[in-house]
Amino acid sequence: MGQMQKTSKGKTKKAKKKKQEEPAPLEMSPGQKKKLKELDEFMESVLSEAGEEFLDEFKQLEGE
Amino acid sequence: MQDRVLGTECEFALVSRASAGSAAADLADEELHDRLTGLAALLVKVLHSKPWPRAGEFMANGGRFYIDRGEHPEYATPECRSVRELVAHEKAGERILMELVSGAQDMLAREDQSAQLRAFKNNGDFWGNSYGGHENYLVESRAMERLADLVPFLVTRQIYAGAGKISQDKPADRIFYQLSHRADYIDNVFCDRTSQVRGIINTRKRDLPRHDSTHRLHIILGDSNMSEYAIALKVGATALVLRLLEEGDPSGLPELGAPVKAVKQTSRHLDSPLDLAGKAGALSALHIQGAYLAEVQKFFNSRQPNAQEQETLNLWEQTLMGLGEVKLSRDQKRLEDDPHDLRRRVDWLLKLWLLNRYQEEGQGGHAQRWPQSLDLFYHDIDPGRSVFYRCQNLDMADRLLRPGEIRRALEAPPQDTRARLRGQIIKMSKGHPVEVLIKDWEKVDLVDSRGRSAGQHFFAQYKYMNKGLRIKLSDPLQAEDPDAVERVQSFLAELQ
């Protein structure tokens, strides 16, 4: 996404926007926080491990 | 028709990665074809090495695994009557493929330690190639004659059945988010082709009336879903609308002025106003789904829905209500509010939430194309690598199925369709000197294979030279046939 692509290189230090669709971090239970952290780490590891070049391998033939 | 037969067919994408050699994107079409053919052949080789009872492409659970056009591994569920069972069988197909991919990965690794093989359950790459997630419904003639009334429903059901997709406008390179993978690959309302040019409704096989005047309706518009709930609602709501068209006389169904355009409009914006045929004004996809739900509810005012129908009605109503309160940014790049937590059940919402979250947490800086990567890895069928399955394991996505239902579907066919008989014959024949030949869903041939060495190619004429038995499975609703079973038993006994 255009907006997403503007993310700076490396870890950004920009202020995080408040997410309306989930409780604010202070309202989250420790269990919820742990799960979100685990999810974030998982996404990061999957994407890092594959690397951007994986997309160059993901070319298919037309199916049905 | 309450006793409807349902089935899905999912085409998967195979991707290999090795330390040497060109990337797939740099290969000419023929080279890419050769590479994918080699990978598909590996899967088949692994399949042949498994002790699973099967007959050619057909498994003992009644389903079918094969390599389809474009070298896509495909799993077709057995004929199911229950939506829940269909979901279990579609998920069983993912597990069968995962098992084959794992075996093929081991083979590849023997030659190249760094080689990787992965499979994805989605409907397109980022180069403009698409592959399908098809649905089949047994339908009475009355509904087949009124299929135009089904079109607005199919166009708009992507608001809960879409898998979500990162797209890119050429040549501007503008990246945007769509609800549906398949929307951009639909060219006509009705079409008899399934590749290159596609219709909302495929007509290629619909003109095959069955002995009792029922037909097979083949829908190729839909996305392949990861969410168990999304599969269930997509198929369950479609079955309800088909029943309405078969037995009801709805008067309030909307008619779209430009259905194909509406598929793409809705995919690009949830609230797009869709032009109506023959009258001024426009309705959003949500309003159109609401009109169908209202007609189905009215239909059931004078009839008792069965448990499955009632469950689907409730789920459909709750989902539409929840979607009414979902708020997206104007450019559809941000999920701003989801008060009913629909992202737990709707793929495109969950994927959008993940994309937003990944960005907000300041990640993604290592790659320009991370949104596409995240989109792709959502659909990995490997539970250890799939972003969707990680959400499910972290209880961020709801499960419809109970523990054990998928495992059961791996081995047992549905007990209320002809899949039961097919699976029974396959299992009965295992260990006997007999070749079980199943060329299609409607018959099983047993041929004496004595005198033929293992692995010897089976020539067509061999079938006529040797003793054989044909069991017809012409009625998809016939689960039991004691006479056929007895004939198979006698045939097998004679070979001993």
Image (tube, rainbow, N blue to C red):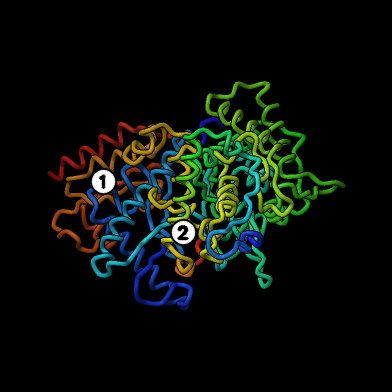
Q: Position of residue B63 (x, y in %)?
A: 38, 46
Chain for mark 2?
Answer: A
Residue B368, percent across and down?
Answer: 56, 66
For the C terminus of chain B, give its image quadrant: top left
Callout 1: SS:
loop
Tag nearer the camera, 1 or 2: 2
Q: Residue at x 63, y 52 (%)?
A: A15
Is the C-beta separation of discs 1 and 2 under 8 Å? no
Q: Nearer the viewer, residue B131 or B251?
A: B131
Kind of residue sitting beneath label 2: Leu
Determine whether B111 is above or below B384 in the image.
Answer: below
SS for dot 2: helix
- The residue that disc 1 covers is B53
Q: Looking at the image, which residue is at 55% across and 34% down?
A: A28
Residue at x-position 50% and y-position 57%: B376
- Looking at this view, is B134 or B12 the one in front? B12
x, y percentage for residue B236? 56, 36
* Marks 1 and 2 share the same chain: no
- Marks 1 and 2, how far apart in space? 38 Å
| Residue B311, percent from left and from top | 56, 28
Q: Is residue B213 visible?
A: no
Q: Amino acid at mark 1?
A: Pro
Q: Residue furthest right?
A: B280
Q: Residues within 10 Å of mark 1 (few under 14, many from 20)?
A: some
Q: Is residue A19 left or right of residue B86?
A: right
